[in-house]
Amino acid sequence: MTQPARILIVDDATDNIEFLARILDDAYEVQIATSGPMALELAGREPPALILLDVAMPGMDGYQVLNALRELSQCRDIPVIFITGHGDTENETRGLEAGAVDFISKPVNPAVVRARVNTHLTLKAKSDQLRSLVSIDSLTGLTNRRRFDEFLALEWLHCQRYGWPLTLLFIDIDYFKLYNDHYGHLAGDACLARVAAAIGGQFGRSHDLVARYGGEEFVCLLPQCDMAKVRNKGYELCDAVAGLRIPHETSPTAPVVTISIGIAAMIPGQDANDPEALVDLADRNLYIAKSQGRNRLCD
Ligand code: GH3
Ligand code: MG
Ligand code: MG
Ligand code: MG
């Protein structure tokens, strides 16, 4: 059985809260906040599937709460429905412009609340599904280049803000053109998928990102990692791929498929101003690993 979606109701008036909660609590898990700061605290800790947000609240009003939510990366995409005063067109327009997905006027009609909540949860699930489809490489099942570029840009800013180092491993299959020439392009595709799975299988931490960067090139982005550990990870990756023992008769390096790795580590904003510098450095080190004989890493 799937968990019911969690809805956060934010309102300063307890009778409003009780009324809304009663409408929704048979189909959803309902969570309550009686002020803006409390809503931000709850949503920031564990983002709900949707937020019903009262506009008129003392202290922090609904618009301020919405703005603050959009500043939190984990809350940025939560659909927010405003609850506004009866026939209050000005507030409704302002709410939609501020990024609310919908508004519901008081006095609240139970059927309307249920229908709108349901619609927005369905839309959100569909857009999440689409987003994951456009982020995945279909041959290998790894994150694709497009998503990697987005993730790298965000991670770069994040590390820059906190002064944390960011590490990139740039991986390239050795003599893959010769592999295709000898075994055919279809066998090449199958080989790519197996190598990708072996690389992906070496990463368990949820904040490490492994992606297919292009053709037979892969990248691993590791936040907050010291160089000794990163080097070790690089050796493990080389061993994992060579350990697949995929025959490569025409490779001058070894009779099996191998990879080479270039490593770069930088403190964003201190060592360089943009993330391309990190990719460039890893790529230069990859080139050195290739020229030193392949099936190795260089940092
Ligand atoms: P090096 O050791 O210097 O990296 O040599 P290499 O032959 O691997 O390098 P090169 O960049 O010349 O060749 C990469 C090859 O990867 C060429 C291309 O046909 C192949 N390739 C790229 N994408 C795919 C793919 O999706 N499927 C298959 N089968 N081959 C691909
Ligand atoms: Mg109110
Ligand atoms: Mg290449
Ligand atoms: Mg290659």
Image (tube, helix red, strand yellow):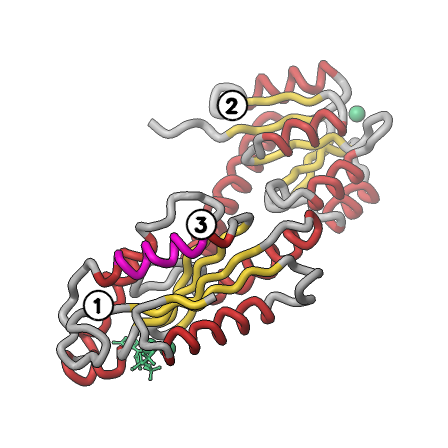
Q: Residues within 10 Å of mark 1 (few under 14, many from 20)?
A: many
Disc 3 within 8 angstroms of ligand 4 (CB): no
Q: Secondary structure at mark 3?
A: helix
Q: Which residue is mark 2?
A: 29
109 vs 60, nearest the viewer = 60
State which tag comes first along the sequence, 1 or 3: 1
State which tag comes first along the sequence, 1 or 2: 2
Q: Which residue is mark 1?
A: 191
Q: Secondary structure at mark 2?
A: strand
Where, by quadrant of the figure, is residue 57 drawn? top right
Disc assigned to residue 105: none
Where, by quadrant of the figure, is residue 188 drawn? bottom left
Can residue 134 be seen in the rendering of this structure? no
Q: Quick check: which quadrant has ligand 3?
A: bottom left
**Mark 1 or 3: the one toward you:** 3
State which tag comes first along the sequence, 3 or 2: 2
Q: Position of residue 125 (x, y in %)?
A: 47, 45
Q: Amino acid at mark 3?
A: Lys
120 on left or right of 170: right
168 on left or right of 73: left
46 vs 213, nearest the viewer = 213
In three-dimensional space, the C-alpha distance between marks 1 and 3, rounded to whole angstroms, equals 27 Å
Please report the bounds of the magenta region as a residue range: 230-240
Q: Amino acid at mark 2?
A: Glu
Q: Residue at x 69, y 22 (%)?
A: 33
Q: Is residue 237 magenta?
A: yes
Disc 1 within 8 angstroms of ligand 1 (CB): yes
